[in-house]
Image: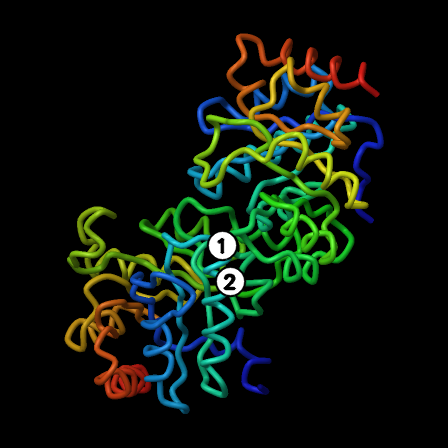
Amino acid sequence: MRWLRDRKHMLPRICIISSGKEKNNEGVHLTALVESIPENVHCMLQIREKHLDGLTLYNLACLARRKRGTRKVLLFLNERADIALVSGLEGVHLPDKACSPSALKKGGLEMLFGCSVHSPQSAIEAERNGADYLLFGPVFDTPSKRMYGPPQGLEKLKEVCRLTQLPVYALGGISMETAPLCRDMGAYGCAALSLFLDTAALAGTLEQLNLLWQK
Amino acid sequence: MAKVIPSYPFLCVITDEETSPVSLAEEALRGGAPMIQLRHKSADGRVLFDWAMEIRKRCTEHGALFIVNDRLDIAMASGADGVHLGQEDIPLRAAREAVGNTMLIGISATSLNEAMKAQDEGADYIGLGHIFPTISKEKHHPPLGLEALEKAASLLSVPVVAIGGITIENAPALISAGAAGIAVISAVSRAPSPLQAAKELSRVINLNR
């Protein structure tokens, strides 16, 4: 996979977050999701199934790698850098209260590191701590993100994008209508869960979003 | 290269969810425990890492081994001597491939079969249990008993560490049955003085050498 070698310099514009509905090793939702991604679409997929034990996460990560085949999908696992490492994924996505990328790198965990940030201050910290990209949100109101507080809004997104050199993905309430607004604020890309739940429409959604960031 | 497991009967103190892991480890070390395992299922990664760094430092000062339960990432990031994996954690083979022989890997086994498999796959030690009835963890099978421990210890070449329901009273019998060491949670963490409990346990198992 030659395209993977330069992956650091070509992070995709789209970050798909898994449904969080997996029950076991079978990974039915994950499989349907990966298989619905067209071969030529560049995107990343974050496996976020926090309720599962380490062994099941490992099996799901290996499953996602197998199902990916030759697709241009970068695979990330939420939080567990160790499982991402041993299953050969490209990276880990670290939630707010996770161990820092610099500490993990120092321990020999070499991979791409994404960090969730919820304020300009935490964005600056994450950059200093060795993050490769940031997820900032929730930008808009969305039921799945209400536990993380009120929406941050577009102005905050703009500020975060201005304060960091890192690619910033807008998260929370992303739709075909709100994605262009985020791009205009300087977002490198967008991240979403519910926008990508309809696997029948996924190919079209991904292609439109990639086009949006080419404009 | 990885450090080595003590060759004398040893005490491994495992942290619990209720007590501050750092102060518990400190007391256990002062009480003579040559192995500390950081086990905390509900803590955030950053907190776990901070604890691990603190315990790592204290273990080095005491010449003790530091093991992290389940989280190989935290073990690697904190420079721990090893990781302890359960049957529902990262598979042993995958973990070994990632760390080679730089780190000790302990495996929890609840049967002789699991223990044999872990040995074949390169485990550095086996945590076998629970041997006696225990309140520390939710259990899905009856206690294994001393006979099962004796059988495992005689059939396996890797050290077998007994765990589950261990007290000062029953600890010597475990060493007599062939356990290389004993691992305890509540016997130390819930003792009026964890320091005294660690001292007592170390003493009774070493008497039995």
Give the residue pinned by disc 2.
Answer: A58
Question: Alpha carbon of mark 1 to alpha carbon of mark 2: how far?
Answer: 6 Å
Residue found at x 40% / y 65% = A47
Horizontal side of B126 relative to B48 (left or right) equals right
Residue found at x 49% / y 63% = A132
Badge 1 vs badge 2, beta-carbon distance below 8 Å: yes
Residue B193 lies, in percent from the top left, at: 57, 9
The residue nearer to you, when weighing B209 against B5, is: B209
Residue B188 lies, in percent from the top left, at: 58, 18
Name the chain under label 2. Answer: A
Residue found at x 21% / y 77% = A198
Residue A55 lies, in percent from the top left, at: 50, 57
Rendered position, B121 above or below B207: below
How many C-alpha atoms fall within 10 Å of the one at disc 2: few (<14), some, or many (≥20)? Answer: many
Residue A12 lies, in percent from the top left, at: 41, 77
Q: Secondary structure at mark 2?
A: helix
Rendered position, A90 above or below A81: below
> Image quadrant of residue B183?
top right
Which amino acid, by three-letter code, is at mark 1? Gly
> Image quadrant of residue B160?
top right
> Image quadrant of residue B197?
top right
Give the residue pinned by disc 1.
Answer: A54
Q: Secondary structure at mark 1?
A: helix
Which amino acid, by three-letter code, is at mark 2? Tyr
